[in-house]
Each structure stands twice: as C-alpha cells, then as structure tokens.
Image (cartoon, grey):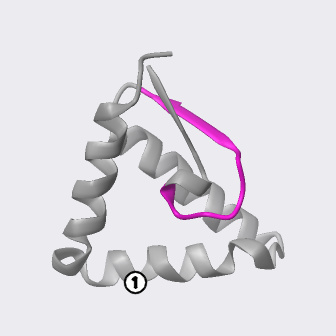
Amino acid sequence: MKTMTCSQLGGPCDLKFRGENADVVIKAQDRHVRDAVQAGDTTHKPAHDAMKKRWRRPLAAMGWYRDTKEAFSELPED
C-alpha cells in the first residue's frame, strides 16, 4: 500500500488516499474532488475542472496519468 495526498494529485488539500496501485488512488481522489464540489467546496473547483477536462480528452490526459503513475511507483510502501 502507498499513500498520495489530494495535493499530490492536483487538488488543494492534504487528504490522504491509500491504495495498492495508482489507479485506486486516482479514483479515490476523483470521488473526493467531485463530492467536495457537490458539497459547495469552491477550493476544489479548479481540480474538478481539470479532472473533467482529462476525462473528456483521454489521449491528451495520458501525460498526467503517466506522470501520476510514475510518482506513485516512486513512493515508499506504507
């Protein structure tokens, strides 16, 4: 298991996400950002907009995804 924070994934806060792989952590952060914005948290709006842009343009988002997976792989195990 490894841990990344919301801010390490492009968000504004230090909430931690743990997972066996980067995909689990990315999905958890996506849910967190979406839920925060739906609850009225404007600090997460830029991250939410960036997330929506990535999902709309998956080929263009591959750079972010590849960089995030690499950053995850370099983290120490918890």
Residue 60 sits in quarter = bottom left
Tell me if 45 is positioned left or right of 54 in this view.
right
Q: Residue at x 51, y 15 (%)?
A: 78
Q: Amino acid at mark 1?
A: Lys
Tell me if 61 is positioned left or right of 15 in this view.
left
Q: Is residue 74 above or below residue 63?
A: above
Q: Is residue 28 above or below residue 63?
A: above
Q: How many marks?
A: 1
Q: Residue at x 72, y 56 (%)?
A: 13
Residue 20 at x, y = what percent? Answer: 37, 25
Q: Residue at x 46, y 73 (%)?
A: 51
Please identify the quadrant where the N terminus is shown: top left
Q: Which residue is mark 1?
A: 53
Residue 54 at x, y = what percent? Answer: 35, 76
Residue 43 at x, y = what percent? Answer: 76, 74
Q: Residue at x 32, y 33 (%)?
A: 74
**Extreme-top residue of the structure:** 78
Q: Magenta part of the protein: which range? A: 9-19
Q: Is residue 11 above or below residue 45?
A: above
Residue 24 sits in quarter = top left
Specify whether residue 16 is painted magenta: yes
**Which structural element holds mark 1?**
helix
Residue 63 sits in quarter = bottom left
Specify whether residue 75 is painted magenta: no
Tell me if 18 is positioned left or right of 61 in this view.
right
Q: Nearer the viewer, residue 66 or 23?
A: 66
Within-10-Å neighbours for mark 1: few <14, some 14–19, many 20+: few
Q: Is residue 71 above or below residue 59?
A: above
Residue 56 at x, y = what percent? Answer: 32, 83
**Extreme-right residue of the structure:** 40
